[in-house]
Every structure is written in structure tokens, then in C-alpha cells.
Image (cartoon, helix red, strand yellow):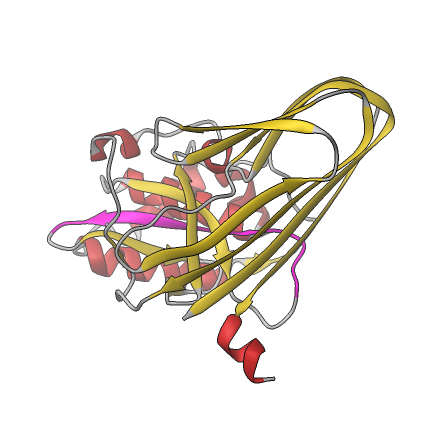
Amino acid sequence: MRLRIHHTTHYRYDAPATDVIQALRLSPINHDGQHVIGWRIDADIDGSFRESTDAFGNRVTMFYADGPTSDVTITVTGEAETADTAGIVRAPEVLPSAVFLRQTPLTKPGPAIGALAERFADREPLAALHALCTTLYAEMRFEIGATTARTSAAEALIAGHGVCQDFAHIFISAARILGIPARYVSGHLARTAPQSAAHAWAEALVPGLGWVAFDPANGICATTSYLRVAIGLDYHDAAPLRGARRGGGGEVLNVTVDASDAMRQSQN
């Protein structure tokens, strides 16, 4: 599938802010099953960009605004070709897999996640992960606005609702309890209408197969409709944008993501 991405993030501050810096994990890398055809990041204010790679192998674009601003819009446009790999991810690995057994404040398990993991403890890893994925899809309610970026996996599971980020954190936490390395993925899922956020899912290391992508918010493994952008132990490591500034007071954030099948668009 050829995926076309148009991702805009608009910040508006109550007053002019200075020293505005944004760390952007918005650019995917090439690997088996995924090839970037073209990709561009732009800002609507004067500033400079600097490219680097973080400890997880993610591409990071730092944006530094030249002067005070009350508004800034970051725009990402690009296309990528994806191929069917049955959910198996063969990408460059820069860290040992044991790193992804480490729990974080966002994935730290409570009794409820421990009980969830125990339901699948007697199964082989692949079967346990599939069952965990479909169970979360069946038993959790997807609800926008019910959680925030600071909501932990344990809190979301107790509440019984959340967004893709929460589903991924719960899946990762339970997998790690089972002794299976697991990590957070941010990226895009092709849809028929624009969304108010990027997508998130998880990857888990299956003996004999390697890393496999699971999307518990949809109850499936990743398909050609998924474009993998960044990975980490949790949301904080793979967040599309994280920034800092001086002053500015309160802020309003608006995100629009249009991830679609480019070939279907060209036929309409």
C-alpha cells in the first residue's frame, strides 16, 4: 500500500513565548515492509531544524524558533510504501531486547494488570500475546478525552477506557510481566477520515519470529495500513512532538492527521 500522510500540529499561546524548542519524532525510517518515498517537515515561522538519532534509533528533528511567537504550526507531508509482513517487524535494532522488559511509570503494573497477565501465563508467547490483544479490544472501551498523556496503564485498565496510547501501555505492561520484551510504537494508521491524533500500538518479541506488531485498540496485528514512525519504552520516548518554551502563559494545541491510501485517492 502507498500511504500518504498530512500531519499538522498547531500551538497557540496566550502571549508571545520565547526560546520555543520542539523535539519532533515525526519521520519514519526504511526497513523490511516499509519504504519512505518522500518526507518533509515544515514550520510556519522562522527557525532552524537539526537532525539526529536517539537511543532507540528514532529520527529526531529539533526545531528552534528564531524569536518570540504566539502561534506555531508544524506540518508533515510524505508518502511511504508498505508491504505485508504478517505483522513481523524486521527493522534495525540498536538496543538489546532485554531493555524492553523494563517497566516505566506509565507501564508500571498494579494488581489489575498482574491479574490480566496471569490469565495468559500458561500459554506459549505468541498465543498469549494474541489473546492479550483481543481481550483488551473486547473488554476495554475506546474513549477520546477520558485519559491524558499522563494516565498510566494501571489507571486506564481500572477505568476500563482510554485511547490507543492506553491500550498500548496496558499491553506492554502485561507482556513484560509475562517475561516478553515489549515496546511502544507511534505512527500512522490509514483511515477514511482525518483524525485528531497519530496512532499508537505495541511490538513484542516472539521467540522464533522476532518482533511482532500488535494493535490492541483494534484487536489485530499491524497490516499494510500501518506506518511505523518511532519506538520506545512508553509514550514519552516516542511522542510525535515534545517541546519547551519560556513564557507564553497557557496554550491551546490542535492536531490533525490525514493518513490515507494514496492509490485510492488517485482513483477517486
Pick the residue in front: 118 or 6: 6
Q: Is residue 17 left or right of residue 123?
A: right
Relative to 247, residue 209 above or below: below
Q: Quadrant of the C terminus?
A: bottom right
Where does the image place residue 4, in percent across and percent down from the top left? 53, 63
Where does the image place residue 19, in percent across and percent down from the top left? 71, 17
Pick the residue in front: 167 or 265: 265
- The verdict on residue 192 being magenta is no
The residue that appears at 39% across and 34% down in the rendered structure is 233
Q: Is residue 18 left or right of residue 86?
A: right
Q: Is residue 248 visible?
A: no
The residue that appears at 67% across and 49% down in the rendered structure is 8
Pick the residue in front: 114 or 156: 156
Q: Is residue 50 visible?
A: yes
- The verdict on residue 205 being magenta is yes
Q: Which residues are magenta?
A: 194-207
Q: Quadrant of the N terminus?
A: bottom left
Relative to 130, residue 42 above or below: above
Q: Is residue 29 left or right of residue 66?
A: left
The residue that appears at 39% across and 36% down in the rendered structure is 58
Relative to 105, residue 194 above or below: below
Q: How many marks?
A: 0
Which residue is outermost to the bottom? Answer: 268
Where does the image place residue 175, in percent across and percent down from the top left? 31, 44
Quarter of the rendering containing residue 49: top right
Pick the residue in front: 243 or 68: 68
Which residue is outermost to the right? Answer: 15
Q: Is residue 46 left or right of residue 181?
A: right
